[in-house]
Image (tube, rainbow, N blue to C red):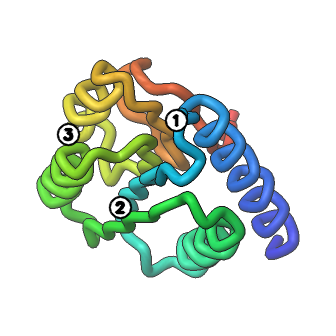
């Protein structure tokens, strides 16, 4: 099971990095890309592993700035954290919503501002996001 999770996370991370740098290229080579990652709860082993692997991959891209927030299971806190990241000027939002409905509005607002949004693990109730990375529990 751990091997499956590791493979899944590496594929997801690779997809996120390629998608973020391909769609957000700026004219100046010294420009920085700011990636915001909003986690609902960061205490699970696989969530901590995902965070560490993102940091490891981003360390290979000196033009990337990484903002990480953990809402600790509080949807209102997660909404406020995402608003703050958007106000700081992120170029990409990666989010694992704590709950679908309470995060709809902020995810839609972010997407409608032209900021790519990658939803991980749990979807929102809306289809307004750039990509979804998660399991198909059919």
Q: Which of 40 and 136 is in front in this view?
A: 40
**Residue topped by disc 2:** 40
Going from the N terminus, do you reach mark 3 or mark 1 first? 1
- Residue lying at 59% horizontally and 47% vertically, measured from the top left: 29
Q: Position of residue 102 (x, y in %)?
A: 20, 39
Vertical side of 93 occupied by 80: above or below: below
- Residue lying at 39% horizontally and 54% vertically, measured from the top left: 36
Going from the N terminus, do you reach mark 2 or mark 1 first? 1
In 3D space, how far apart are the residues under numbered discs 2 and 3 (Cα atoms)?
Answer: 12 Å
Q: Which mark is residue 102?
A: 3
Q: Which of 130 and 57 is in front in this view?
A: 57
| Left or right of 7 in this view: 125 | left
Q: How many marks?
A: 3
| Left or right of 127 in this view: 58 | right
- Residue lying at 64% horizontally and 46% vertically, measured from the top left: 16
Q: Where is residue 75 in the image (x, y as percent from the top left)?
A: 20, 54
Q: Where is residue 105 in the image (x, y as percent from the top left)?
A: 20, 29
Q: In which quarter of the image is residue 42?
A: bottom left
**Residue topped by disc 1:** 26
Q: Which of 108 and 98 is in front in this view?
A: 108
Q: SS class of the residue under badge 1? A: loop
Are the residues at dot 3 and dot 1 in contact (C-beta closer than 8 Å)?
Answer: no
Are the residues at dot 2 and dot 3 in contact (C-beta closer than 8 Å)?
Answer: no
Q: SS class of the residue under badge 2? A: loop
Q: SS class of the residue under badge 3? A: helix
Q: Nearer the viewer, residue 27 or 7?
A: 27
User: Could you tell me which quadrant the N terminus lies in?
Assistant: bottom right
In 3D space, how far apart are the residues under numbered discs 3 and 1 (Cα atoms)?
Answer: 32 Å
| Mark closer to the observer (3, 1) | 1
Q: Where is residue 133 in the image (x, y as percent from the top left)?
A: 63, 41
């Amino acid at each position: 099971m751990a091997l499956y999770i590791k493979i899944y996370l590496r594929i997801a991370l690779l997809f996120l990095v390629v998608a973020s740098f391909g769609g957000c290229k700026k004219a100046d080579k010294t420009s920085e890309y700011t990636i915001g990652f909003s986690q609902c709860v960061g205490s699970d082993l696989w969530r901590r592993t995902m965070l560490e692997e993102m940091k490891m991959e981003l360390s290979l891209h000196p033009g990337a700035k990484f903002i990480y927030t953990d809402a600790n299971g509080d949807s209102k806190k997660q909404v406020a954290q995402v608003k703050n990241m958007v106000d700081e000027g992120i170029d990409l939002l990666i989010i694992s919503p704590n709950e679908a409905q309470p995060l709809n509005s902020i995810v839609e607002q972010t997407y409608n501002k032209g900021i790519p949004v990658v939803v991980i693990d749990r979807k929102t109730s809306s289809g307004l996001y750039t990509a979804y990375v998660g399991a198909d529990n059919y």
